[in-house]
């Protein structure tokens, strides 16, 4: 599982980072660390549009999005 830390970044940058990672290795599972709820929504929406499953959990003040 590869980790993508997008905490503190504003959209669309987190989505573009995930998009680049999926282009590099579509079959990898990614753990995306985010600090903003709207980033979670955008990452989840994008990943689902690419046929990926997502799960989200809160870890302290941050969010962890698993994209598989």
Image (tube, rainbow, N blue to C red):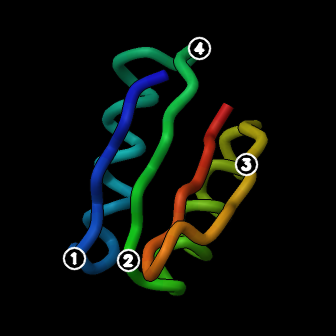
Q: Report the residue at 71% width, 51% height from top.
A: 49
Q: Nearer the viewer, residue 63 or 50?
A: 63
Q: Which residue is mark 1?
A: 8
Q: Earlier in the sequence, mark 3 or mark 4?
A: 4
Question: For the residue carrying disc 4, how many other residues have a C-alpha within 10 Å: few (<14), some (14-19), or many (20+)?
Answer: few
Splitting the image into 4 quarters, where does residue 52 fall?
Answer: top right
Q: CA distance from mark 2 to mark 4?
A: 25 Å
Question: For the residue carrying disc 2, how many other residues have a C-alpha within 10 Å: few (<14), some (14-19), or many (20+)?
Answer: many
Q: x, y (%) of residue 19?
A: 40, 42
Tell which tag, 3 or 4, sits nearer the viewer: 3
Describe the element under mark 3 as helix, strand or loop. Answer: strand
The disc label shown at residue 35, or none: 2
Q: x, y (%) of residue 21?
A: 36, 31
Q: Earlier in the sequence, mark 3 or mark 1?
A: 1
Question: For the residue carrying disc 3, how many other residues have a C-alpha within 10 Å: few (<14), some (14-19), or many (20+)?
Answer: some
Q: Is residue 27 above or below residue 4?
A: above
Tell which tag, 1 or 4, sits nearer the viewer: 1
Answer whether labels 2 and 1 touch (C-beta < 8 Å). Answer: yes
Q: Which residue is mark 4?
A: 27
Q: CA distance from mark 3 to mark 4?
A: 14 Å
Tell which tag, 3 or 2, sits nearer the viewer: 2
Q: Which residue is mark 3?
A: 54
Q: Report the residue at 32% width, 71% height from top.
A: 12
Q: Is residue 37 above or below residue 42?
A: below
Q: Is residue 32 above or below residue 44?
A: above
Quick check: 55 left or right of 62?
right
Q: x, y (%) of residue 9?
A: 22, 73
Q: Report the residue at 40% width, 26% height from top.
A: 2
């Amino acid at each position: 599982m590869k980790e993508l830390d997008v905490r503190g970044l504003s959209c669309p940058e987190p989505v573009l980072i995930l998009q680049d990672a999926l282009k590099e290795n579509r079959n990898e599972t990614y753990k995306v660390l985010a600090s903003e709820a709207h980033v979670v929504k955008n990452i989840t929406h994008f990943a689902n549009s690419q046929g990926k499953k997502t799960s989200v959990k809160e870890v302290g003040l941050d969010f962890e999005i698993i994209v598989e």
